[in-house]
Image (cartoon, rainbow, N blue to C red):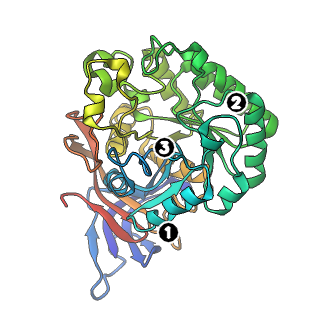
Amino acid sequence: MLIKNGFILSPANNLEQYGDLRIEGDRITEIAAPGILEPGVGEEIVDAASCVVAPGLIDIHVHFRDPGLTYKEDLHTGALAAAAGGFTTVICMANTKPPIDCVEVLSDILARANAEPIRILQSAAISVGMKGKELTDFESLAAAGACGFTDDGIPLLDERLVAEAMQRAKALDLPLSFHEEDPTFIEKSGANCTAPAIAEDILVARDCMLALHTQATVDIQHISSANSVALVRTAKSLGARVYAEATPHHFTLTEEAVKQYGTYAKMNPPLRTERDRLAIIEGLKDGTIDCIATDHAPHSTQEKKTDDFFAAPSGIIGLETSLALGITELVKKGHLTLGQLVEKMAVNPAKLYHLPYGILAPGSVADLVLFNPDEPCIPSSYRSKSENTPFTGWQLFGKVHYTISRGNIAYRAGR
């Protein structure tokens, strides 16, 4: 395959140039200035005029609901949604039914994931049954292919268990990801008024200090509080190996969105104040927040469309709108350059999970996304099984034209 006439953007190796790129098998073999590479006999040509050619995006935080809740999403529909959003690699959370707390369940997921058009990696649970009482067999799960450990969705409240988990994960050189909401301070989940920032801040402070003490690699998931951003910034300055991720909904919306979108603006942690939103953007700008991750959380329309806000499940889908929201809300508004956005969505996620992706260079894996950052795109229908998002109908910028995974076209606009 020969990709011609694109603007090739690869922050990992400081590559920014107009040019052409050749793929043979699952590898990039050549990158050159425009017009130098001639197509071979029968070689597929992709015209990338007006498009940025960037490394395939990596989402470190998705829920594909497989096994157990596949009426909301499954590996295949999740993979299609990811490809449509420009993602070539995703990392699934462990809170399935049953949870990913043993080798048998993990091996089944990974075997079925091999058939999908993108890379689906799987985290394993930190605790058995995600009950926060007993650690899983980290060593066996890592040997079977777990890329990290998390009880996402359920905070861990036993400090000794958390410290032991950090020590064991550090020995394996794998990251731990934490959902930081202490239920002690939560009246009802999903809204800032009933799940205040102190619930997040207190666990972020604890885990930042434990990470500093153990030197484990820790990811603070879906950070939403200004104080938590400051805590992560301090921990990094002290030498802790702490990463943080922010979602597009937390850098785009505030708690006021609940009035307009109802349950489609309900998530854990909740949307917070304008001060919090601006602090997240500042954290993205100064490097405190390393990654943008969607927390893609599909739910059925019947579950979400209820008059009882607190009875509805929390979470929204995000894979098909993430890149466009990043371009529209961060790049177009001058907060990040396009290269910095790609760092947050591809380069840094690859670093966190020690993945050989997130770079365009001869010899590297042919995972790419081709998108036009100036072309409008209005979300209206989704490849996900679910449609629970407040962003339907928004005018965004950054249409994805192609997603190429392992040298194969996983998504082509209009098909």
Residue 340 shows which numbered tag? 3
Disc 1 element = loop
Instruction: Compare residues 13 and 80 and report the one nearer the observer.
Output: 80
The vertical placement of 261 against 187, above or below, is below
Residue matched to label 2: 207
Q: Position of residue 193 (x, y in %)?
A: 45, 10
- Amino acid type at image mark 3: Gln
Q: Which residue appears at 20% of the width and 40% of the height?
A: 378
Instruction: Estimate how packed mark 1 is, as few (under 14), some (14 to 19) or many (20 or more) residues with alpha carbons within 10 Å.
Output: many
Quadrant including the C terminus? bottom left
The vertical placement of 243 against 252, above or below, is below
Residue 157 placement, left or right of 186: right
Instruction: Compare residues 216 and 24 and report the one nearer the observer.
Output: 216
Q: Which residue appears at 68% of the width and 23% of the height?
A: 205
Residue 170 placement, left or right of 298: right
Residue matched to label 1: 365
Q: What is the spatial separation of the Cα atoms under label 1 and label 2, in whole angstroms?
A: 35 Å
Residue positioned most to the bottom = 41
Instruction: Estimate how packed mark 2 is, as few (under 14), some (14 to 19) or many (20 or more) residues with alpha carbons within 10 Å.
Output: many
Q: Position of residue 137 (x, y in %)?
A: 71, 52
Q: Is residue 238 visible?
A: no
Q: What is the spatial separation of the Cα atoms under label 1 and label 3, in whole angstroms?
A: 21 Å
Residue 263 falls in image quadrant:
top left
Disc 3 element = helix
Give the mark nearest the N terminus, 3 or 2.
2
Q: Which residue appears at 43% of the width and 51% of the height?
A: 66
Give the mark nearest the N terminus, 1 or 2.
2
Q: What is the spatial separation of the Cα atoms under label 3 and label 2, in whole angstroms?
A: 27 Å
Quadrant including the N terminus? bottom left
